[in-house]
Amino acid sequence: MKSELANAVPRLKRLLPRFRKLRIGVLGDLMVDRYVWGNANRLSPEAAVPVVDYVSEQDCPGGAGNVAVNIAALGAQVDIFGVVGAQRTSGRGENAKKMLRTKPARHCTPACASWVLVTGGLFPMRIA
């Protein structure tokens, strides 16, 4: 396993510069992942679930948007084609397009949002 990784690193270094010459299309669901950060120091008396004290939240591209951001970070030009759908993002659709840092296609609207609760470095809950 270690020798395979050692052989892969030089090949990866040769391939990465080629990404700058590529134009890649990404098709899929454009989502907004909202990470809600908090501290959980006790369990609820009504049920065995953590009580989370809110600290902050952060919106990030999810689904195909996350793929597009990662490809763009490698240097390729990305064209995004997404689903036009009902948004549950409370007006965060434009922010999601800005987060992509690419030129979205004309019919490109974040289709849905998911919430991820983060406490103590763990992800005890995801709401889709």
Image (cartoon, rainbow, N blue to C red):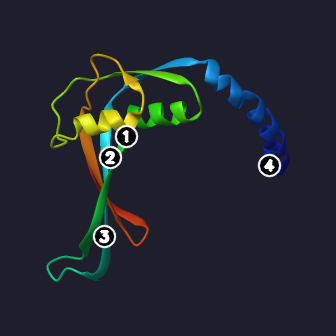
**Element class at badge 1:** strand
| Residue 35 visible in this rendered orientation of the protein | no
Residue 89 in the image, given as x and y percentages of width and height: 19, 42
Q: Mark 1 or mark 2: which comes first in sequence?
A: 2
Residue beneath disc 1? 62
- Is there a contact, CB below 8 Å, between mark 1 and mark 2? yes
Dot 4 or dot 3: first in sequence order is 4
Q: Residues within 10 Å of mark 2 (few under 14, many from 20)?
A: many
- Would you name the residue on which mark 2 appears? 33
For marks 3 and 2, the one nearer the N-term is: 2
Q: Looking at the picture, how far across and down is residue 127, in whole percent?
A: 25, 52
- Mark 2 and 4 residues: CB-CB less than 8 Å, in contact? no
Which element carries disc 4, helix, strand or loop?
Answer: loop
**Residues at circles 4 and 1 in contact by the CB criterion of under 8 Å:** no
Q: Which disc, if any, is residue 123?
A: none
| Mark 3 neighbour density, 10 Å: few (under 14) some (14–19) many (20 or more) | some
